[in-house]
Amino acid sequence: TAKERMMARREQGLEVAKVEGRWVLIQQDLYHRAPVTADSPLLQELFSMTGLREVKRAVRSLVQMASDNYEAEKAGEPVIDISLHRLFLGNPGTGKTTVAKIYGRILKELGYLSNGEVVMVGASNLFGGTVGSAQKAVNDLMDRCAGKVLVIDEAYTLKDSQYGKEALDVLVERVQGGPGEDFAVIMCGYEDNMREMLRECNPGLARRFKIERDGPFRFADYSDEELVTIMLQRAEKTGLHLTRDLAEAAVRVVLSKQRDKPNFGNAGAVNNLLDTAKERMMARREQGLEVAKVEGRWVLIQQDLYHRAPVTADSPLLQELFSMTGLREVKRAVRSLVQMASDNYEAEKAGEPVIDISLHRLFLGNPGTGKTTVAKIYGRILKELGYLSNGEVVMVGASNLFGGTVGSAQKAVNDLMDRCAGKVLVIDEAYTLKDSQYGKEALDVLVERVQGGPGEDFAVIMCGYEDNMREMLRECNPGLARRFKIERDGPFRFADYSDEELVTIMLQRAEKTGLHLTRDLAEAAVRVVLSKQRDKPNFGNAGAVNNLLDTAKERMM
């Protein structure tokens, strides 16, 4: 290695002395401890990145310590041991991968690593599916990483299985953290999870990967101003033109609200927002609408980025809802929602605070009162308002939220929620979830997934009879009642149809099914048959009309 470094100096045109015909080696050839100065391109690259104040401070401290050691080495004085192994703590999208690559190159320039490249793996790459497989997997991986930086993403998940814990034990054997190790290991994850891992697993892990004070690199979430800067930079790189005012509005309206959710995506959230904006811009072009260009880049407009537009009274969606028979309370609730969204739209344009709108609802009432039809219109309205990216409806029964074993609800609910991204999930007869342990587990998982805050790209509707739903909210997870309001303007209440409304529905259904029915006969049928069924629990409403017409058609045939 020393000979290679000496030859590299010659190739760079630097003078290399000879003594008695032999090339002279110098200290940098043998152990190459050289200070990285403030004007180093590597440091400049790091310090030019948006945000990362704590990370930059930690790197400055590392470089200063290395510089002090360099001077101590020259003077023959003791040096301070520097561990190359680090915890990278923080949410996704905060620059951990980019910083890891710079970190590796800095360690190589300082002479602590011979290569400095980065090897990225997930935690599952450190073990197989059998007891003892971790020994080989970790050792093979560490051998591959000689001279390099090994980055283990979501490292905290190793604590969740016996195989993962075995991998951590082998890692502790290989990582001593002393001088002379020609590799570095970075473990990435959320701070709380990483603390739990260090507390519960092999004690040697906490000695090798310090989590207190100056040990880890802490990647803070980006501020709103930093997200604006990142958005403008990413837009330019991807051929999009975006004004600062619009970027600031998009951060304020969309991203700053997502910040309240766990594991905020930071720069990843910016990328997702720009990807969606680009798709909307391209859709405008495909519709034949003119899309401007500035300096060769496509111009994004407000509707591309957050598409908050008021739904006006003449909207086909509202007209479709308001043309439905009955549903007075539901129509009033939808008018209130649309008005609130319109007020928020004006507030957003003026840069004023907006009122948070929860998309999650209880649909309360008997069968046959139009809940499914209204749910579909509701989803399309939320999409048109810009609160959902898709707006389609996924209908399930309560039993779809769990299996037949303890713990099955976790997977069932999470898989279902993942399928419903951008959509409306409608859970019919949701109150039956309170009747079993499996159902109660499903409600607990649902509470974890449904936060009810701004930025959620899904809506959950729970349908059922009001008394049963009240009982469920009273007896089950307290978080449920906070997410699904049952008082005042929270739920959509579907009242039973009046006799007059049942007559109208009967005449409409008869016409659609090819039957002729006079109003007098329809009124008589409602008075003689349906109005008497109304006294029974769980009256079927439009379903009862359909049953009556089906029977009438059979008799006619």
Image (cartoon, grey):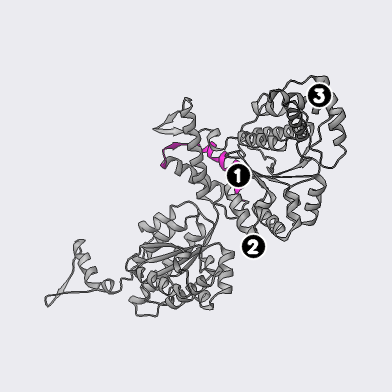
Label 1, on which residue? 457
Is residue 80 in sight in this rendering? Answer: no
Q: Is residue 405 above or below residue 382?
A: below
Q: Nearer the viewer, residue 191 or 311?
A: 311
Q: Is residue 161 above or below residue 419?
A: below
Label 3, on which residue? 522
Name the residue at the left extreme.
Answer: 21
Q: Quote the CA–CA distance across marks 2 and 1.
A: 26 Å
Dot 1: what SS? Answer: loop
N-term mark: 1 or 3: 1
Q: Is residue 27 above or below residue 431?
A: below
Q: Residues within 10 Å of mark 3 (few under 14, many from 20)?
A: some
> Which residue corresponds to the image point at 70% horizontal and 29% vertical from the top-left?
321
Asked if labels 3 and 1 touch by Cβ distance under 8 angstroms, the answer is: no
> The N terminus lies in which quarter of the figure?
bottom left
N-term mark: 2 or 3: 2
Q: Nearer the viewer, mark 1 or mark 3?
A: 3
Instruction: Name the quadrant containing residue 523.
Output: top right
Magenta part of the chain: 237-259
Instruction: Name the quadrant containing residue 135.
Output: bottom left
